Image (tube, grey):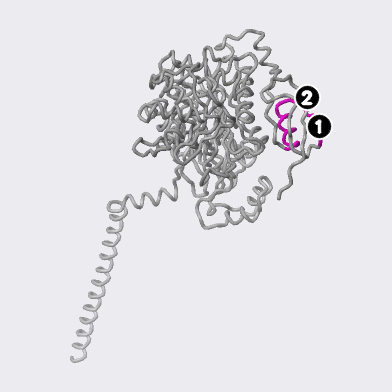
């Protein structure tokens, strides 16, 4: 009996333990089920976006299709910048099966070290660039290669005609404008990129997602400039040769339509190769024509002459005192390049008397002088619409000291850009009306519809029309006919203008030998249509504008008219005049006195003239057989009388 009770009691205990164990297992199963449900809720409801994004990264990829960047044209529809299709290769190292083979293929094709490619293909990244912006012809066979993990993208690569580099600028590898108009108009030029969504199979192959929205790229707008690429090329060529001939630091040149304000050419040297941008420096990209400020020297006498004509009633025959070339003002002296006594105001202008300019400015007075300078556009931006344009420096009258006005009379104690100086002379050429210079003619969308158009804008009537015509005829034309600008003359064209030789301020003026040589003018003098300026910075072999900048101006204008039908039509030129321009048979002889024989020979050769030495070429030029400014036939011989250089003590 006792044994039976024991057995029953043991069986009851086992049943309870089994029940407990079953309950524990059931509880565990229930908790496991709850965990699964919670995880599913987390994935499908709570964190659905997170896990969708993770899935997309694994099985989907978003590929950007670059829009065609807008083209840039000159005024005649010639392309200056365009985008061409290129190929960029990239890889997903996780799916690359044969990295050694791919590395060998890329190394053979592109010439880079095989180890470089192998390192990229064996990295733990999911995306690596192998090559960027490869020409389609060079990439064709690799594009057909069916290698797992290797992909390519069609991109745009910018190509340039390689003129007007500082104006147009350039783009980076991603086709984004980073300089010049490429940067300034990037929002118009870049267009809108397209996007395509691809899905990846288990083997790594990609295919377009069937139910995803695919956005097609939209091309950027095109830009038309006022630039004439032929004239631009001529100006670039001439300023480059000027720097080489005179061993100058830099040079700039601008050609402008005086009636509309359109810029036909704007060139700077040094420049850069727009299609090889890896070594470009910030100094090379600087558009000196609008960013650099300088003391304009005698070219600024346009302000003094205008104020004197209208407020002092000066005319060409008004007698003025040149004080024999020297005048003492306060504790400083103003000295002319040659002694001048009682002379006419016309002579003071044509011979560029600083003494007369300073004394005349004092007679005009500060308020009137400041007003004329301001109205000509000095001390404010021209509005040409280019990045980095400087406003120059025209100090308010309260900041003037007693020397400011007389020194400003001949172009010191004021800072101006080349474009500001040109704008002032274009104002005189345009019957006293100052026009806003501009260089962007229009922006056109992909459908050919104008987005923006530049138009001629009249800014101010600076001087009376009769004043402007009188000054053009009596002063600036005479500068070229008989004065300091004779070497700016062009066969068959009546030129008016002004020389300027300004000593640069480099901590002081005394004892310094850094100059800016400038010639600015317009043509034809009787009915002006075009204006141009040439500035040569720190020429070494000569520095007077008559020998440096004026001959460059002459060649720019002569060559431009000879090649431009538009100019010839505007100037209503006769066939005989055209033939003269085509030949440009006469050359203004430069001033060679004081140069070494070798330097003079190189300068004459650049002007198309021959050299004959009376003495050793290693000596200094004492005199020349043809006076400076004399017109000579091409290939004419200039005999140079040489003298031994004085020995240094």
| Residue 604 picture quarter | top right
Specify whether 191 is left or right of 523.
left
Part of the protein shown in magenta? 596-615
| Residue 588 picture quarter | top right
- Give percent across and percent down for residue 573: 60, 9
Q: State the residue position of label 1.
A: 614
Question: Mark 1: which secondary structure?
Answer: strand
- Give percent across and percent down for residue 447: 44, 22
Identify the mark at residue 492; answer none if there is no mark. Answer: none
Residue 84 in view (yes/no) = no
| Residue 614 in magenta stretch | yes
Q: State the residue position of label 2.
A: 637
Disc 1 versus disc 2: nearer the observer: 1
| Residue 303 picture quarter | top left
State whether residue 649 is above or below residue 316: below
- Give percent across and percent down for residue 433: 42, 18
Specify whether 554 is left or right of 444.
right
> Which tag, 1 or 2, sits closer to the chain's start?
1
Between the C-alphas of marks 1 and 2, the distance is 12 Å
In the foreground, 229 or 37: 229
């Amino acid at each position: 009996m006792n044994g039976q009770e024991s057995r029953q009691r043991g069986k009851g205990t086992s049943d309870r333990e089994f029940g407990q164990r079953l309950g524990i297992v059931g509880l565990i199963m229930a908790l496991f089920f709850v965990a699964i449900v919670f995880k599913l809720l987390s994935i499908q409801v709570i964190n659905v976006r997170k896990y969708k994004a993770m899935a997309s990264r694994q099985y989907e990829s978003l590929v950007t299709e670059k829009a065609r960047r807008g083209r840039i044209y000159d005024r005649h529809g010639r392309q200056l910048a365009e985008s061409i299709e290129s190929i960029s290769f990239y890889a997903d190292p996780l799916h690359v099966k044969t990295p050694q083979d791919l590395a060998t293929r890329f190394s053979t094709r592109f010439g880079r070290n095989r180890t470089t490619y192998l390192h990229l293909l064996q990295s733990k990244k999911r995306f690596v660039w192998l090559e960027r912006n490869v020409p389609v012809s060079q990439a064709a066979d690799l594009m057909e290669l069916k290698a797992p993990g290797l992909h390519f993208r069609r991109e745009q690569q910018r190509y340039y005609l390689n003129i007007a580099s500082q104006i147009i600028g350039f783009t980076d590898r991603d086709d984004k404008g980073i300089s010049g108009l490429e940067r300034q108009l990037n929002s118009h030029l870049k267009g809108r990129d397209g996007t395509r969504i691809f899905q990846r199979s288990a083997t790594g192959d990609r295919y377009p997602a069937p139910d995803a929205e695919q956005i097609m790229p939209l091309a950027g707008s095109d830009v038309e400039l006022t630039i004439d690429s032929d004239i631009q090329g001529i100006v670039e060529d001439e300023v480059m040769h000027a720097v080489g001939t005179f061993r100058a630091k830099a040079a700039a040149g601008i050609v402008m339509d005086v009636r509309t304000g359109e810029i036909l050419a704007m060139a700077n040297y040094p420049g850069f190769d727009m299609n090889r941008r890896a070594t470009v420096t910030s100094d090379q990209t600087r558009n000196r024509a609008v960013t650099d400020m300088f003391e304009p020297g005698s070219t600024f006498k346009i302000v003094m002459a205008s104020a004197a004509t209208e407020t002092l009633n000066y005319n060409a025959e008004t007698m003025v005192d040149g004080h024999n070339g020297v005048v003492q003002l306060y504790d400083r002296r103003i000295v002319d390049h040659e002694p001048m006594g009682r002379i006419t105001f016309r002579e003071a202008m044509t011979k560029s008397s600083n003494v007369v300019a300073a004394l005349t400015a004092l007679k005009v007075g500060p308020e009137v002088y400041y007003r004329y300078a301001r109205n000509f556009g000095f001390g404010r931006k021209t509005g040409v619409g280019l990045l980095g344009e400087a406003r120059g420096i025209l100090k308010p009258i309260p900041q003037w000291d007693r020397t400011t006005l007389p020194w400003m009379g001949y172009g010191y104690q004021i800072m101006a850009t080349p474009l500001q100086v040109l704008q002032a002379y274009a104002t005189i050429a345009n019957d006293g009306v100052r026009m806003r210079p501009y260089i962007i003619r229009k922006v056109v969308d992909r459908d050919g519809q104008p987005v923006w158009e530049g138009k001629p804008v009249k800014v101010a009537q600076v001087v009376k029309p009769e004043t402007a015509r009188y000054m053009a005829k009596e002063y600036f034309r005479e500068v070229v006919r008989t004065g300091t600008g004779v070497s700016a003359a062009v066969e068959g064209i009546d030129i008016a203008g002004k020389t300027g030789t300004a000593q640069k301020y480099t901590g002081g003026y005394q004892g310094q030998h850094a100059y800016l040589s400038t010639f600015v003018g317009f043509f034809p003098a009787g009915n002006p249509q075009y204006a141009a300026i040439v500035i040569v910075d720190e020429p070494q072999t000569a520095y007077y504008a008559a020998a440096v900048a004026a001959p460059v101006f002459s060649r720019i204008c002569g060559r431009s008219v000879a090649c431009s039908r538009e100019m010839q039509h505007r100037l209503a030129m006769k066939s005989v005049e055209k033939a003269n321009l085509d030949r440009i048979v006469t050359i203004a002889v430069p001033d060679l006195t004081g140069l070494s024989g070798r330097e003079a020979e190189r300068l004459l050769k650049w002007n198309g003239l021959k050299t004959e030495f009376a003495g050793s070429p290693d000596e200094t030029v004492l005199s020349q057989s043809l006076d400076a400014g004399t017109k000579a036939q091409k290939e004419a011989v200039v005999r140079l009388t040489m003298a031994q250089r004085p020995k240094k003590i």
